[in-house]
Amino acid sequence: MKRPNWHEYFFGIAEKTKERSTCNNGMVGCVFVSREGHTILSTGYNGSPRNLPHCYEVGCDLDESGHCVRTIHAEINAIVQAARDGISLKDSEVYSTMFSCYVCFKAIANVGVKTIYYDVEYKPKKYAEQIARVRRDAALMGVKLVNKKDVCDILAQDKLKEESE
Ligand SMILES: [Zn+2]
Ligand SMILES: [Zn+2]
């Protein structure tokens, strides 16, 4: 029996959440969790605000630089959801299918998240400035940025090693 560790479990939930995204230009999912209790506090995906049309229905709403601005990003949506339900995200951790954009990063950090686990990194060339800002401020604010590879693949490799020894 292969039982996922907590990191794999939460990344799996973020991946599932991503499937609910409503914009083809940006499918992202995330889950905010309580580290102590291993409980899910809130989930979010890229989607239009309530009662507004979705990109998959009416097409994307692109700005001058070609970015779709119709949706609320997954991370902000999860924070909004928690606010609606009266759930504190202070001292929580977040698992996201993608590295945070600078706007989402600021909100995540300010809500009191201590560790951001992410899977896919932004294209380094196109988003170099944005990535640099996130990394700079994360260091200043004491927020850890942890790539999925460093908590999932390594553990998986260790497990394989143990089995073969
Ligand atoms: Zn869109
Ligand atoms: Zn964002």
Image: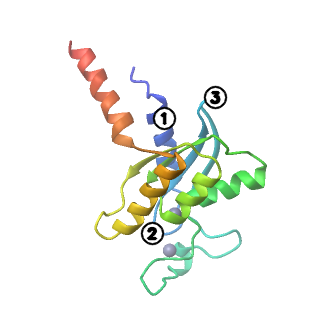
Residue 89 seen in the current view:
yes
The quadrant in which the C terminus is found is: top left
Residue at far left of view: 165
Instruction: Indicate which label's residue lies in the foreground, 1 or 2.
Output: 1
Which residue is found at the position 45% from the left and 77% from the top?
A: 67
Circle 3 is placed at which residue position?
A: 37
Image quadrant assignment for residue 125: bottom left
Task: Describe the colour scheme in one phrase.
Answer: rainbow
Q: Is mark 2 within 8 Å of ligand 1?
A: yes
Q: Amino acid at mark 1?
A: Tyr
Circle 2 is placed at which residue position?
A: 24
Which residue is found at the position 42% from the left and 82% from the top?
A: 66
Q: Which mark is residue 59?
A: none
Q: Which mark is residue 9?
A: 1
Rendered position, 92 above or below 131: above
Task: Tell whether 165 sits left or right of 127.
Answer: left
Q: Amino acid at mark 2?
A: Asn
- Number of residue marks: 3
Neighbourhood count class around disc 3 (C-alpha, 10 Å): few under 14, some 14–19, many 20 upward: few
